[in-house]
Amino acid sequence: MPTLIPTGRLAPTPSGLLHLGNGRSFLLAWLWARSEGGRIILRVEDIDRPRCKPEFRAQAKEDLQWLGLDWDELTPDQSTRTDIYRAALQRLIEAGLAYPCTCTRKDIEEASSAPHGDEGAIYPGTCRGKWRNAAHARQATGRDPAWRFLWQGDAVKFHDELAGEVSVDPSTLGDFVLWRRDDLPSYQLAVTVDDAAQAVTQVLRGRDLLLSTGRQLALYGALNLQAPTRWAHVPFIQDAHGRRMAKREGDVSIKALRERGVDPRRVAAFLARTAGLAAPETGAWPADLVAGFAVAQISDGDFLLSDEALRSL
């Protein structure tokens, strides 16, 4: 097998303005790839079409460039690749690894045996083996079905650069959605297909997606695709109330700082320091931080963004 060039990705979702937490994750992903002489791709993850807006797509690119982050390749937006994801789904259906599911969110929540996991109520397997095909499910229930991955077997194991050795037992997370009832691919399916197609070798993202790596590795195996070889799931930036930053909450955005005239070098250096990295108080471009970067240096604790810390910008 040929040696793969270290390749990381910046993958904004244009459902709102990028906040400081997003900016830090993209900075760390960029530093990781660049510090190993690698490439960076930019991929807009806009499969959730009802929530994603063109103006946020353009703003995300401007914000990344303002922070001093560049990329070697702009890959096609996910919204243009639906047929490719559908073909992957069909392969799983033909292999007997996907099945139609007519359960609503309420059905799953009310199931007496449905504990909660990282993505909410764990699917109890109600529709496993219940329907011959999607048409049968639709005729019997009057509902357009979703498609779920038939996930069973041994635990999925991988090494995370921050969390160490991780083992994910399929029975503790349940069969996950591959294709939504509104005829859109799931995040799990789309990101797996794209990372393989775009030869991504490094994935750095928030720690909330740690267990999703197990789901995606199961899909890589089922689709016979090359998986990234290195993973890092980083802590969050929290607001003054200890809540993880989120677009829907209108948290401090990169755009707002930019419009206030804040020096982008101060923002980049500040984000590096919140992750436990050494960066001058006076500011620095990301390129200035590459030489001293190592993924093992990233702090394993969340950073509380106090009002005082914000004022320092």
Image (cartoon, rainbow, N blue to C red):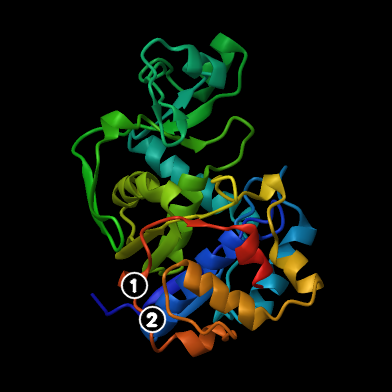
Q: Residue at x 44, y 83 (%)?
A: 34
Q: Are there few (<14), some (14-19), or many (20+) residues within 10 Å of tag 1?
A: some
Indicate the position of residue 302 as horizontal and vertical percent values.
45, 55
How many labels were placed on the picture? 2
Residue 116, image quadrant: top left
Q: Residue at x 25, y 36 (%)?
A: 169
Query: Is residue 228 something that shows in the picture?
Result: no
Q: Quadrant of the C terminus?
A: bottom right
Front residue of 259 and 26: 259
Indicate the position of residue 182 as horizontal and vertical percent values.
64, 33
Q: Residue at x 42, y 36 (%)?
A: 118
Mark 1 to mark 2 CA distance (whole Å):
7 Å
Amino acid identity at mark 1: Gln
Indicate the position of residue 179 as horizontal and vertical percent values.
52, 37
Amino acid identity at mark 2: Phe
Q: Are there few (<14), some (14-19), or many (20+) residues within 10 Å of tag 2?
A: some
Q: Residue at x 39, y 46 (%)?
A: 212
Q: Are marks 1 and 2 in contact (CB under 8 Å)?
A: yes
Q: Which residue is outermost to the left?
A: 154
Q: Is residue 78 above or below residue 73?
A: above
In-image side of 240 versus 55 (left or right)? left
- Residue marked by disc 1: 297
Indicate the position of residue 177 as horizontal and vertical percent values.
47, 34
Front residue of 175 and 122: 122
- Residue marked by disc 2: 293
Residue 162, image quadrant: bottom left
Q: Is residue 305 above or below residue 133?
A: below
Q: Is residue 215 above or below residue 182?
A: below
Q: What secondary structure is marked by label 1? A: helix
Q: What secondary structure is marked by label 2? A: loop
In-image side of 144 versus 302 (left or right)? right
